Image (cartoon, rainbow, N blue to C red):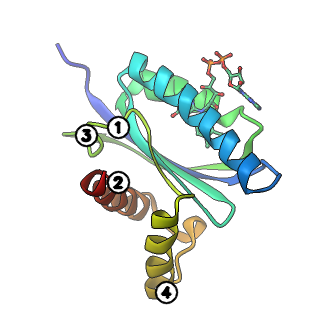
């Protein structure tokens, strides 16, 4: 029997310092480890970085999501980790993404500029639902242009 699916949404504040190239290397490390672990754990989702904050959606079996979130909370590459939502879901929003990422490319920056201009975009002011919708829309755009 397939385990019930859950979705967890949180945001956090970046603790990684350095220039853009160093930050990109840290993000690459985080994504490589995340994708490796998440494939193993049947977790899908997406990670967003903007204006010093991360926001992430994790979808999958509850016990796997909880174990992953425990590790994430203990990671000193970020802090002030704030859980925004943990709900059971009928279907995944990111079925093809062991961990999508939106944040540092020129195309992402342009899309964020549009969002910022229209909504005063600030991750820490968004609800779990808003972050989920934003990431789903941005990731779907990313899939469409890939
Ligand atoms: P290990 O196999 O021991 O691997 C840990 C490796 O990660 C280390 O070798 C090191 O290279 C690196 N690492 C771990 N902690 C640090 C640190 N504090 N500083 C520098 N390097 C470090 N993990 C997931 O499994 N799934 C996710 O979706 C996920 N999302 C993340 C999102 C963010 C914003 C951050 C900051 C981290 C995320 N992580 C995620 C990583 C998570 O916090 C753990 O580092 C990871 O899950 C540990 O994996 P492991 O138990 O296999 O450890």
Q: Ligand 1 near label 2 (Cβ, under 8 Å)? A: no
Residue shown at the point (57%, 72%) measured from the top left? 122
Give neighbour class at mark 3: few <14, some 14-19, many 20+ (Cα, 10 Å): some
Q: CA distance from mark 1 to mark 4?
A: 28 Å
Q: Are marks 3 and 2 in contact (CB under 8 Å)?
A: no
Q: Are marks 1 and 2 in contact (CB under 8 Å)?
A: yes
Q: From the image, tell me which residue sits under label 3.
A: 92
Q: CA distance from mark 3 to mark 2?
A: 13 Å
Q: Are marks 3 and 4 in contact (CB under 8 Å)?
A: no
Give neighbour class at mark 2: few <14, some 14-19, many 20+ (Cα, 10 Å): many
Marker disc for residue 97: 1
Give neighbour class at mark 4: few <14, some 14-19, many 20+ (Cα, 10 Å): few
Q: Earlier in the sequence, mark 3 or mark 2?
A: 3
SS state under label 4:
helix
Q: Earlier in the sequence, mark 1 or mark 2?
A: 1
Quarter of the rendered structure image containing ligand 1: top right
Marker disc for residue 83: none
Give neighbour class at mark 1: few <14, some 14-19, many 20+ (Cα, 10 Å): some
Q: Earlier in the sequence, mark 1 or mark 3?
A: 3
Q: From the image, tell me which residue sits under label 4.
A: 117
Q: Nearer the viewer, residue 117 or 21?
A: 21
Q: CA distance from mark 1 to mark 2?
A: 9 Å
Image position of 21 (left or right of 133):
right
Q: Are marks 1 and 3 in contact (CB under 8 Å)?
A: no
Q: Position of residue 75 (x, y in %)?
A: 72, 34
Q: Nearer the viewer, residue 116 or 13?
A: 116
Against 105, residue 45 (above or below) is above
- The quadrant holding residue 74 is top right
Q: CA distance from mark 2 to mark 4?
A: 20 Å
């Amino acid at each position: 029997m397939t385990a019930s699916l859950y979705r967890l949404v949180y945001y956090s504040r970046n603790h990684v310092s350095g220039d853009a190239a160093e930050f990109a290397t840290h993000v690459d490390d985080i994504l490589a480890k995340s994708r490796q672990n998440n494939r193993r754990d049947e977790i899908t989702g997406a990670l967003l970085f903007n204006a010093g904050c991360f926001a992430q959606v994790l979808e999958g079996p509850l016990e796997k999501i909880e174990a992953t979130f425990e590790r994430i909370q203990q990671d000193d590459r970020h802090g002030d980790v704030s859980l925004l939502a943990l709900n059971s879901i009928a279907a995944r929003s990111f079925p093809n993404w062991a961990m999508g990422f939106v944040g540092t490319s020129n195309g992402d920056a342009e899309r964020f500029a549009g969002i910022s201009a229209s909504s005063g975009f600030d991750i820490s002011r968004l609800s779990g639902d808003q972050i989920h919708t934003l990431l789903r829309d941005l990731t779907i755009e990313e899939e469409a242009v890939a």
